[in-house]
Image: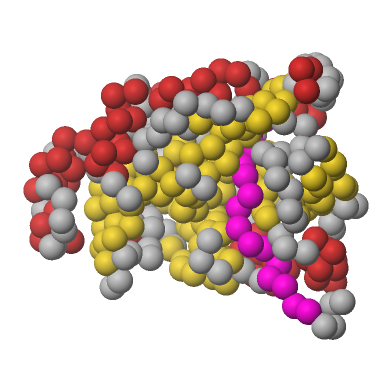
Amino acid sequence: MYEQEEYELFKGIDHIEFYVSSAKTWSYFLRKDMGFNLAGYSGPETGIRDRISYYLKQGDINIIFTSSMDPDTEINRSVNLHGDGVRDIALTVEDLDFTKKKLESRNVKVSEIRSINDGNGKIREACIKTYGDTVHTLIERGDYAGVFPGFNQVYDNEKNTGVKGIDHVVGNVYEGEMDRWVNYYIKSMDFKQLITFDDRDIRTDYSALRSKVVRYNDNITFPINEPARGLKKSQIEEYLDYYRSEGVQHIALKTDNIIETVKMMRNNGIEFLETPDSYYNSLNDRVKNIYEDINALRDLNILVDRDEYGYLLQIFTKPLTDRPTLFFEIIERKGARSFGAGNFKALFEAIEREQARRGNL
């Protein structure tokens, strides 16, 4: 089979699963504040006794929140150590046997394949590790017709804020570990390195970091950050201190109309990082020829950057948990392929203002 037919290792991000203290609370938050729809539920009512899971969907974004019904589980151990956070960036594969064989030939440890059946068909899955306690579940869906095995399908009222897909998922690793994980994705998993930022690109008067971006085709993108030496503690160091390991820092969600998306989310109660008014005084000189009203961007604190392919608009929420370890980015691309390098200083100064309020700068 393998000599006759070649598949891509991965097709895209299948879903992202969080381990959290209260899956029901997170489900409510994403539905009411961020416009997601409840698509599935798993728990005692569906024959699952040890955990509760809610499956949320908006556009092509699939997010699962899982909490434990038993104090002595991996879920609770994760929450006790890290707080609420991302456990699994699950990847869809076309042929799991093919992907498993390829990865194992490159010395990646892949779990045994597990088949899960229900009335909607069958999926097959296996698991590999990445930085910290984060994993990638490899999922072959085949002709499976349901939401996910073990979940009752739920038909929620349609409501959305316009986000439609996952642009990228950002991981934070310890100093000196970034290249190790970049090489893991490139050499073992056929990702390509897209871009590199060093501590000269990403620094303020107080802190700095280094970042490299790896991508598989056009639909799986993982920036990986590590701290760099600075006068004070960087946002990456703060994350690592509170998360107590390497892990996912933020998830960037794509929209086709960031102004309307941010307006709706703000009205729903989402708090975003603030940008000084002075940032917008020179915006025309820096990015030129954008369609959006600068005053509208100023009112909403939306950042803008341009590369050789076009421009992008982006904004970042404040941390979503009690620990400053997780947030979302909202991004609209008008041709740009980059990640807002021109906004790094403004963004990190905004983060540092929040760090200072917490006494962690």
The magenta stretch spans which residues?
5-19
Name above or below for residue 245 compared with residue 22: below
- Would you say residue 9 sits in the magenta stretch? yes
Position of residue 298 measured from the top left corner of the image (x, y, whole percent): 16, 40
| Residue 182 in which image quadrant | bottom right
Q: Nearer the viewer, residue 232 or 223?
A: 223
Position of residue 41 measured from the top left corner of the image (x, y, whole percent): 67, 26
- Would you say residue 232 sits in the magenta stretch? no
Q: Quadrant of the N terminus?
A: bottom right
Position of residue 159 measured from the top left corner of the image (x, y, whole percent): 41, 30
Residue 312 seen from this side: yes
Position of residue 233 measured from the top left corner of the image (x, y, whole percent): 45, 39
| Residue 296 in which image quadrant | top left
Name above or below for residue 270 compared with residue 257: above
Name above or below for residue 67 compared with residue 239: above
Q: Residue at x 72, y 73 (%)?
A: 7
**For residue 106, side relative to residue 307 (left or right):** right
The colour scheme of the drawn protein is secondary structure
Residue 227 seen from this side: no
**For residue 37, side relative to residue 255 (left or right):** right
Q: Nearer the viewer, residue 38 or 228?
A: 38
| Residue 287 in which image quadrant | bottom left
Q: Residue at x 47, y 44 (%)?
A: 59
Q: Residue at x 52, y 47 (%)?
A: 60
Q: Nearer the viewer, residue 94 or 211?
A: 94
